[in-house]
Image (spheres, rainbow, N blue to C red):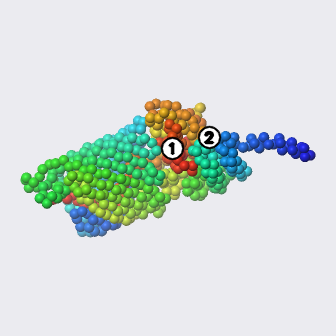
């Protein structure tokens, strides 16, 4: 019942979303099929509320998944995450992460997982990003607690309209193993077991996942494909696909299918599923505005300052460059050499009128490109430029 | 009489030459400069802004495009500027028409620009239109982006709030972590943990 209470709480919070400045939420409702690895398959109905809140360096998110199957078989999964970002230092940015996940079920006690850690990002430019993170935490399942630690690294890039990411996460957890002559070692227990048949062992598994997001008109496509490697569990291919199409500003059709892997940390089994439903966008996905803060950050990859007596200050962060040039419709597209400004910064003072401007930079005499921190767009002439809004 | 006419023609030649944009002749080959100049002259005759056309040609020159490609891009922009003026009227400024041309190119309907214009009631449209264009390019559905921008315009918000809106949407849609959310939202909750 705790799950239902949490679900109601999340749904109620989502309904209140429009009152807050940076709050966005969705409520998915659908039905489909579900084939868990070790239970009876069948039809299932799901309700999935999600919320996200952003304010400056702070980001909070929560998601709940409630499913109801025939014969009173209900399950609930909830998750919350909090991120706190430090100001960027050149290409480097640090982020503190805290996460909590829990499950409730119709017949047995649920599971909880708490973890916290630090993630470091490297943003070399053109929308590409790499990260590395380390987390520690604890998982509780079936009445036992297990310390866990997780290391991850990954990278993401935007290839035209497609945003791709590859992540590799290695999780280790101390577990109590059941020895079975049949060799089925992936069924693990922390509950009472006959003496002499249990031992504690450190279990490691590695997930490598390629994920992507592609928006085509009003259609959003999300996909992920991964492989789980573990000494104790069979290698498993995990995947998920979802598509949502806007049919009104606050309503979308959504479909999802996939195969989730079993979670050796909590002993939750894997499953295959398909679901079709509606997504209600509760609150505005386009958040109400707050005072500008990001461009005041001198470490932003690219920024154009306010108009002054001699023009606007343009600063672009480019590491390991010998020369950086800028050209745009405010320079008659004549390349202007930037001066060094700090460790990785390059700077110029130029008169720029408010409005939408096109520009590009060239590093060490190479190709013209959109500066990091701007939205790159394909130029009619080949290559890419950036369009920026100047206040 | 003939001598006077000849003299007048000769005296006007430098003026005609001066009307050609020197930036084009300096940066483009003769044929391309002449073709672009024709489009520029056509725009001038119909009261459309010419500077965006020149800038488009210069952009092509800097990015190393062929003359053919430059002329085609300038002609396309000329058409977009005409449609922008149809949407906003002849009182729109050069910057507004240029930005509106970009908005129409991004797929926004002229009615959205007209509504924005009516809500701004004489205040500059450049930043709101640029933000609207940016939101659509960022992947926000046009109706949703339009509604958000119109809401701000209706409330008489200043330009910096439109820019802040764009920034927030970028952060939201790109994801603060730089990682796309590959986990489908609509899915069943997992079954209970297995205890054997």
Residue ID for mark 1: A370
At mark 2, the secondary structure is loop
Q: In the displayed image of the protein, which residue is found farthest to the left?
A: A195
User: Could you tell which of marks 2 and 1 lies nearer the N-terminus?
Assistant: 2
Residue A4 in picture, x, y percent from top left: 29, 59
Up/down of A343 relative to A78, above or below: above
Q: Quadrant of the C terminus of chain A?
A: top right
- In the image shown, does A180 or B65 lie closer to the viewer? B65
Near mark 1 (Cα within 10 A), the count class, few <14, some 14-19 or many ≥20, is many
Confirm whether circles 2 and 1 share one chain.
yes
Residue ID for mark 2: A332
Specify the quadrant of the image occupied by residue B188: bottom left
Q: Badges 2 and 1: C-beta atoms under 8 Å apart?
A: no
In the rendered structure, the residue with mark 1 lies on which chain?
A
Residue B107 in picture, x, y percent from top left: 55, 56
- In the image shown, does B19 or A14 lie closer to the viewer? B19
- In the image shown, does A48 or A115 lie closer to the viewer? A115
Residue A230 in picture, x, y percent from top left: 23, 52
Residue A162 in picture, x, y percent from top left: 44, 53
Please give the name of the residue rendered at 33% of the width and 58% of the height, measured from the top-left corner.
Answer: A239
- In the image shown, does B156 or B139 lie closer to the viewer? B139
């Amino acid at each position: 019942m705790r799950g239902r209470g949490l679900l109601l709480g999340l749904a109620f919070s989502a309904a209140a979303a429009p009152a807050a400045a940076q709050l966005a939420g969705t409520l998915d409702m659908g039905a489909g099929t579900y084939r868990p690895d070790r239970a009876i398959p069948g039809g299932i109905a799901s309700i999935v509320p999600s919320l996200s809140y952003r304010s400056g360096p702070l980001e909070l998110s929560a998601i709940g998944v409630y499913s109801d199957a025939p014969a009173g078989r209900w399950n609930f999964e909830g998750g919350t995450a909090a991120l706190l970002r430090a100001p960027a230092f050149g290409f480097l940015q640090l982020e503190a992460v805290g996460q909590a996940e829990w499950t409730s079920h119709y017949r047995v006690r649920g599971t909880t997982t708490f973890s916290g850690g630090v993630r470091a990002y490297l943003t070399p430019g053109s929308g590409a990003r790499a990260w590395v993170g380390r987390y520690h935490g604890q998982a509780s399942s079936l009445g036992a607690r297990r310390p866990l630690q997780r290391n991850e690294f990954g990278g993401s890039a935007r290839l035209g309209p497609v945003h791709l990411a590859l992540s590799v996460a290695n999780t280790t957890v101390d577990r109590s193993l059941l020895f079975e002559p049949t060799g089925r070692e992936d069924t693990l227990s922390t509950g009472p077991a006959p003496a002499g048949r249990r031992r504690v062992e450190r279990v490691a598994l590695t997930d490598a996942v390629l994920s992507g997001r592609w928006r085509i008109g009003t259609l959003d496509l999300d996909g992920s494909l991964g492989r789980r490697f573990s000494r104790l569990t069979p290698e498993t291919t995990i995947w998920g696909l979802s598509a949502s199409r806007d049919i009104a500003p606050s309503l979308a059709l959504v479909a999802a299918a996939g195969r989730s892997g079993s979670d050796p940390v909590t002993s939750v089994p894997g499953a295959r599923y398909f679901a079709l439903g509606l997504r209600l966008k509760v609150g505005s996905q386009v958040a109400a505005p707050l005072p500008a803060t990001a461009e005041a950050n001198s470490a932003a990859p690219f920024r154009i300052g306010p108009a002054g007596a001699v023009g606007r200050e343009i600063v672009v962060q480019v590491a390991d460059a010998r020369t950086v040039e800028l050209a745009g419709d405010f320079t008659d597209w004549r390349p202007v050499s930037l001066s060094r400004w700090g460790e990785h910064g390059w700077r110029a003072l130029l008169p720029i009128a408010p409005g939408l401007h096109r520009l590009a930079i060239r590093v060490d005499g190479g190709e013209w490109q959109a500066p990091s921190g701007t939205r790159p767009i394909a130029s009619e002439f080949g290559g890419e430029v950036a369009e920026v809004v100047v206040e | 009489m003939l001598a006077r006419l000849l003299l007048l023609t000769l005296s006007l030649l430098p003026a005609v030459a001066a009307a050609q944009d020197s930036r084009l002749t300096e940066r483009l080959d003769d044929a391309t400069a002449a073709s672009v100049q024709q489009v520029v002259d056509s725009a001038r005759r119909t009261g459309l802004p010419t500077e965006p056309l020149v800038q488009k040609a210069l952009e092509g020159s800097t990015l190393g495009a062929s003359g053919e490609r430059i002329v085609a891009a300038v002609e396309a922009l000329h058409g977009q500027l005409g449609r922008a003026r149809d949407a906003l009227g002849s009182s729109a400024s050069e910057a507004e028409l240029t930005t509106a041309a970009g908005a129409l190119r991004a797929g926004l309907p002229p009615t959205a620009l007209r509504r924005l214009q009516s809500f701004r009631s004489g205040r500059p449209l450049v930043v709101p239109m640029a933000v609207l264009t940016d939101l659509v390019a960022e992947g926000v559905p046009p109706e949703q982006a339009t509604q958000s921008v119109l809401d701000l315009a209706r409330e008489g918000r200043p330009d910096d709030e439109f820019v802040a809106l764009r920034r927030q949407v970028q952060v939201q849609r790109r994801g603060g972590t730089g990682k796309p959310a590959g986990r489908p939202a609509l899915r069943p909750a997992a079954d209970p943990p297995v205890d054997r």
